[in-house]
Amino acid sequence: MGYKLEIEPTGDVVEVQEGQTILDAALRQGVYLPHACNHGLCGTCKVEVLEGEVDLGDASPFALMDVEREEGYCLACTARALEDVAIEADIDEDCDARSIPVKDFMGTVIESKMLTPRILGVWIELDEKIDFQAGQYINLHVPGFDEPRAFSLANQPSTQKIIELNIGIIPDGEATPWIHKNLKVGDRYKISGPFGRFFVKRSAQKPMIFFAGGSGLSSPKSMILDELENGCTKPITLFHGARNQEELYYADMFKKLDEEYENFRYIPVLSNNEDENWSGEVGFTNEVAKKFYDKFEGNKAYLCGPPMMSEACITTLMQGRLFEKDIHIEKFFSKA
Ligand code: FES
């Protein structure tokens, strides 16, 4: 049995099935609601219930405090409608966002190989093509684990049915060690997506600076390949930080693109300054970036990597006169 879910201030109306979360219903019908963890933990999906009754589900008391419950708020990722419902969400209009409904897909692993000692590259051929914006992520349903794990798509949308995931191992995590040990060619996996609002803000028509660290290279790889394929003429710079040369993956591909495209510049940066065979940049990406830019004003910056890297980059960018509206951070939370 389904209920009507009305979403203000956009006035969108979607159908929500009994037992389905409000967030799932909206995203599957192509209506965006803010979200990050999808599991009642972060509070990003908090909405006000204007009419109708909902079951709050498993919302963490930190993400949804008692006073908010009393005032009629719920978390869209855990709340389920018990009748027709109207909610008010804090939706910021983004003219670069395409409305792509979230769907479930099945796919077969066609290749897997270590890209660095810690990052496994996995290629999955889906049974049907997935539509997404470069920079978005999917949920991978891992056998034996209740919650799916989120990974950015490292391929660009033109690869059609074949998706690439770069899966960094978190040694004290659960699913990533399992995937590194057990995933093999021929396995079938369920994925859902696409999710997230991290993508190139094309309407801004500004040069782009990407900062990537660790397996955070996935989204920049997808976004840069997509931009170049689509004839972008704006300058694009990628600062890729890694500890050592072994961890600097896809370096040859980016070097080649740097030679091939006048508007693309690749700047790999090693934080380990003891590598005698390295003549490139050394230090942290944000510090190195200062050598290439007098000021950052007039650009769009995209940050993908560990929180410490993002924080350092934000400070440097702001000191260089680039502010919040032009700094975009890849944000999603997933269990390891
Ligand atoms: Fe709902 Fe995090 S609490 S997305």
Image (cartoon, grey):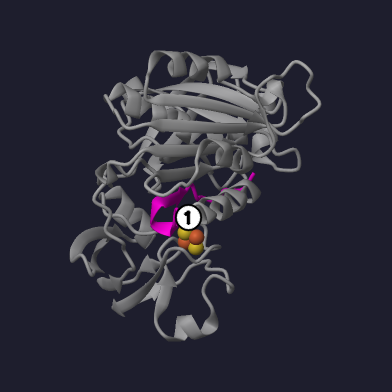
- Residue type indicated by callout 1: Ala
Mark 1: few, some, or many residues within 10 Å (few <14, many ≥20)?
some
- Res. 107 visible in picture: yes
Quadrant for the N terminus in the image? bottom left
In the rendered image, the vertical position of residue 248 relative to residue 22, given as above or below: above
Q: Nearer the viewer, residue 52 or 271?
A: 271
Front residue of this view, candidates 94 and 101: 94
| Residue 110 visible (yes or no) | no
Displayed quadrant of residue 74 = bottom left
| Residue drawn at x 72%, y 34% as measured from the top left | 271
x 36%, y 76%: residue: 48
Q: Which residues are magenta?
A: 322-336
Q: Left or right: where does residue 245 sit relative to residue 135?
A: right
Q: Is residue 32 magenta?
A: no
Image height check: is 287 above or below 53? Answer: above
State the residue at coordinates (50%, 85%): 67
Is the residue indicated by label 1 positioned so its CB lies within 8 Å of ligand 1?
yes
**Direction right: furthest residue:** 274
Residue 127, horizontal then vertical, whole percent: 35, 23
Where does the image place residue 303, in percent across and percent down from the top left?
51, 44
Whether residue 327 is in magenta: the answer is: yes
From the viewer's side, name the closer residue of 270 and 32.
270
* Residue highlighted by disc 1: 36
Q: Position of residue 217 (x, y in %)?
A: 54, 32
At mark 1, the secondary structure is loop
